[in-house]
Image (cartoon, rainbow, N blue to C red):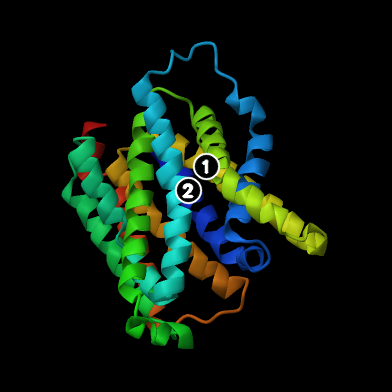
Amino acid sequence: MRPLASYGCLAASMSIVGAYVALTKPLVAVFPLFLLAWLRFGIGGLAMLRWLRKPAGEPQLTMRVRGLIFLESFLGNFLFTIFMISGVKLTGAAAAGVILAFIPAVVALMSRIFLKEAISLRVWGAVICGVAGIGLLSLGGSVPADDAGASSLPHAWLGNMLLFGAVCCEASYAVIGKKLTAVLSPKRISAVINLWGFVLTMPAGIYAAWRFEFSSVEAGIWLLLIAYALAASMWTVWLWMTGLRGVPASQAGVFTVMLPVTAAAVGVLVLGEVLSGLQWLAFVFALAGLILATVPSASIQAKA
């Protein structure tokens, strides 16, 4: 797969994630956490039933590969969601944005440790731009009243730890995904890790469903749920795994900057929010990081 196509898939994946994160506030207000997660995996699983079938040319899965598939779902789907939502509740959204800015750096570090990938100065420069940009994006705007006093909350430290756990989960998702793409197709990975997510959320999901009044949910919310489930469980995973096949995981990690950047853009263009000057500067940093990570260097062009 050509690098430019891989970049497009990675950017599209994280952009869709950022968009649905910004647009699913009504779902969180209606559905309990584990019920929402269980419904998401269930709807996504129905859409990907054909993807579960083992292709004729796929080798027999080893125990190691099966373990990686489980970890991909457990860390990237299950724990990431729990850590993220629980952490934001304890420490506030502004702090969450700052901590999530470290995702590209953690991806690069894990890629170096576990995949033995050489990380170029340009990729490190892109990581630094991403961290700086998203930090500005998080700090540059007005802070809600709940966030303003977040640092004084008695359990704010625990919230920060949970959010950093979410960062590690997301970084693990990128690194493990790179290993899986060597033996499985993007469609098969998407379907199998979604199935594990459905199984992991089933006990709490069934309990929440037993006590939930489904008849009170409006038709518009159901449509939004279906769109969210397809985007979160199917489209974004397939795009990310497809993109990972063509670039190193450390370079792919830079594209995680698109998640909070897109969420902010949706807030401005769709939800009517206003960005400060510092937040606009954040977009410049994010764009610079993507250019550093994706535009071929002169030496590479000369070799081509």
The quarter of the displayed image where residue 287 is located: bottom left
Q: Is residue 110 above or below residue 47?
A: below
Q: Residue at x 83, y 60 (%)?
A: 215
> Mark 1 sits on what residue?
200
Q: Residue at x 63, y 33 (%)?
A: 48
Element on which disc 2 rests: helix
Between 228 and 209, the one nearer to me in the picture: 209
Q: Position of residue 303 (x, y in %)?
A: 21, 32
The quarter of the displayed image where residue 44 is located: top right
Q: Position of residue 2 (x, y in %)?
A: 40, 33
For marks 1 and 2, the one nearer the N-term is: 2
User: How many residues crowd around disc 2 within 10 Å: few (fewer than 14), some, or many (20 or more)?
Assistant: many
The quarter of the displayed image where residue 113 is located: top left
Q: Position of residue 81 (x, y in %)?
A: 48, 55
| Marks 1, 2: nearer the viewer | 1
Q: Residue at x 44, y 61 (%)?
A: 84
Q: Tell me which amino acid carries mark 1.
A: Leu
Q: Residue at x 44, y 70 (%)?
A: 88
Asked if disc 1 and disc 2 are in contact, CB closer than 8 Å, the reply is yes
Q: Is residue 135 above or below residue 11?
A: below
User: Which label belongs to residue 78?
Assistant: 2
Q: Is residue 224 above or below residue 43?
A: below
Cα–Cα gap, marks 1 and 2: 7 Å
Q: Tell me which amino acid carries mark 2.
A: Phe
Q: Position of residue 28 (x, y in %)?
A: 61, 65
